[in-house]
Each structure stands twice: as structure tokens, then as C-alpha cells.
Amino acid sequence: MRISLLKKIFYVLVLLLSCTFSWSQNRLLSKNTRVSVLTCGTGNESYSLFGHTAIRIADPENFIDTVYNYGAFNFDTPNFVLKFAKGDLQYFAVAHSYTDFINVYTYEQRSVYEQELNLPDTLKQKLFDNLNTSLASGESHYTYKFIDKNCTSMVVDMINKTLDTVAIIKNTDTNISYRTILYPYFENHFYEKLGTSIIFGKKVDQLGTQIFLPFELQKSLKTIEFKNHLLAKETKTVLQFNPNPPSSWWNNWYTYLILLGLIVVFNKSFINQLYLTVMGVLGIFFVFAGFYSLHLELEYNYNILLFNPLLLAVTYFSYRENNKRIFQSVIASLFFLVVYLFIVSNKVHFFIVLPLIVTNGILLVQLAIKNKKKSAII
């Protein structure tokens, strides 16, 4: 009896949900509907360093105030970390109430800006229908790519699809590289800046001609025209918080320089070999990541010339006390280090890797001098 009653309740709920969703899918928006792009400020967590983009549909007559967010993913995905590293982790869109969305950013103390789109009613309806169809059909699921597919690019694609033209294009900062565009976002996050500087390869040195960050979209929308008028109205500030940079005793230039300085000053054989081993192992990791990962940003990583797997040969021959092989592998490593210096000299991350270049150079030159004399005696 109880099971039968539960089944009936379940079927009624399913029917109600189906009807509600179907009704929302076919709902006609009123003439007072506003469509806007929300740009959310940066945060101090790694996932929030670049901000966020979403679309808002607000129709007070139909009690609709929904935010469509293309930045959701499932932490319970099997092999989550491996999928994210490989580049085949699935992201998807979710719909929130505007109130809930704003409450989250109020709690996180992150600013939110709104740009209402200057669209005719027919296109507002078309965008609303496209968004709901995307949610219902699974079209909103996509494989995340740092530059090519993310919450901002998906919003751009959806709006362009609705306008039936490539109206939203990047029209600012197209003469500087993606790496240069990204660099300021890591202010007060030193080791995150260092990490991305050394793991990103050649792709991020290309000119940043594609919109991939929320504030790039916001800046472009201010000047883009559609049918002889500006596509976006004046930017409105919904939430405003002053940046509150994190304070850390270790995540800064000082610990970085002190650590490398101590390695050079102490000049202990064990410490030097440990340092060179770590550099070589990281080089192998970068090689593996470049081949394994589908993230194009990790391919053709010339930073491998600094984090050179050949340094493992230096430490191996040092352990075996093979002076001739030590000298040969050191000279080869110095050659690649000089090549790297020329490649990186005009890049925005030159100064952040310069202490590593100097440390590698000092240790390798010392080894070359020491083992050249010994191999000559032998």
C-alpha cells in the first residue's frame, strides 16, 4: 500500500516537473524583458582569478529572472583530476535564479557588472529559447579549453548564434599575446603566476585575437555595433567590492629569491643535485603533459629547455662520479639554457624565470669547471 502510494507521488512529481519545464520552454516573453551579460569580478581562489561571465533574462511580467551560467562541472566525475589535466573534462550550463546568483557573489565579495543588450523583442525571445533548448538537449555540455572553450566563449557563441552573425568579436588588445593578457590576473598570486608561466607553451604567445576572458568581453561589448546601434547599453554596477588581495608570508618573490639564493650560496653537492633533479623531473612532466593533454596551451613548451630532462643525466653521472660524462652533459645543458635565454628574452615572463636561469647557469658552470679539470687529469 505504502509502495503504491509512493509510486503515485513519484509519477505526479515527474508529470508536474515535465509540464513545468515544457511550459517554460514555450513561454512567450513580454515586451518588458531585459537581456543582459553579467561580468563577475575576480576572486582569490584559483578558479576565480579570471572572473566569470553569464547571461541574464529578466521578465517581471512573467516572474522570470534567470541567470544562465556556462561554468558548471561535476566534482564527482570519475577520474576528475586526470580528465581535467588531459583536457576532456565536461563542463555544462546551469540556470540559477538571479537572487541566488547575486547572493553567491555577495558572499564571496566579488563585484558584478551588467550590460543590457540592445535587442529587438524577437531576438530576446530567440535567445531565451536557444538557452532553454541548449539546457534541455545537452548542447550546453562542452569540453573545457582554457582559451578556446570556456564560460565566456560559450556566451559569445550563444549570442552570435542568436543574432545569426558573428557580431561579437574582439576589438581591443589584439596586438598583444594571450600570455601578456593573462599576466596581470596573477597579481598577488606569485607562485600561480610562476606555475602558469612555465607550464604554458607556444600557443599563449600568439596574439590574443579571440575573446576568452570575461573582462575582454565586457570591454568589447562597449564598442560593438549591431544593426547600426551599440549592441550593449551603458555598463551598470550591480555589486562593487574593493579588491582584497591575499596576504601570504610564502607566496611572493621573497621566498622564491631567498630559496634560490640559499642554493647558490651554500653550494652543497647534495642540495645542488637535488635541485637539478627536481628541475629535470619537472621537464619530463612538461614533456608528458604536452603529449598527453588535449589542452593546446601545454603543447610546444619551450620552457623544457630550462627544466631540461638532460639535467637528470648530470645528476646520474655525478652519482657515478663519471667526470667526462658529467662535463659533456653539463655543456649540452648550458647550450640549451643559452637557447632558452634567447627565446624567452622578449616574453612577458622573462623576469620571473630569470632567477631560475641564473641559478641553473651558476650550478652548471661550477660543475663544468670542476669536472673539466678532473677529466683532464684522468
Image (cartoon, rainbow, N blue to C red):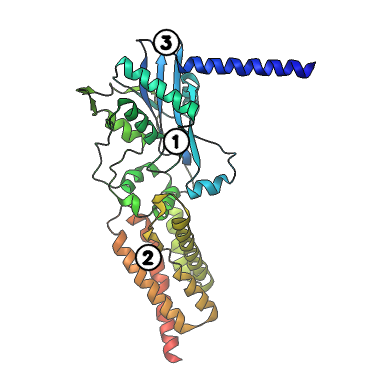
At 32% from the left and 64% from the top, the residue drawn is: 341
Considering every residue shown, the one lying at the far bottom of the view is 378
Vertical placement of residue 245 versus 266, above or below: above
Vertical placement of residue 16 versus 245, above or below: above
Secondary structure at numbered mark 3: helix
Q: Position of residue 274 (x, y in %)?
A: 52, 67
The reply to whether discs 1 and 3 touch (Cβ–Cβ < 8 Å) is: no
Q: CA distance from mark 1 to mark 2?
A: 33 Å
Looking at the image, tell me whether mark 1 or mark 3 is earlier in sequence order: 1
Q: Toward the viewer: 176 or 276?
A: 176
Residue position marked by numbered label 3 in the rendering? 60
Give the crowd class for mark 3: few <14, some 14-19, many >=20 residues within 10 Å: few
Considering every residue shown, the one lying at the far left of the view is 228
Q: CA distance from mark 1 to mark 3?
A: 31 Å
At 54% from the left and 71% from the top, the residue drawn is: 270
* Residue type, mark 1 in image: Gly
Q: CA distance from mark 3 to mark 2?
A: 62 Å
Count of numbered circles on the image: 3
Q: Position of residue 229 (x, y in %)?
A: 21, 22
Mark 3 vs mark 2, foreground winner is 3
* Residue type, mark 2 in image: Val
Residue position marked by numbered label 1 in the rendering? 43
- The answer to whether one can see residue 28 in this image is yes
- The answer to whether one can see residue 250 in this image is no
At 76% from the left and 17% from the top, the residue drawn is: 4
* Residue type, mark 3 in image: Pro
Decide if residue 107 is on the left or right side of residue 123: right
Residue position marked by numbered label 2 in the rendering? 358
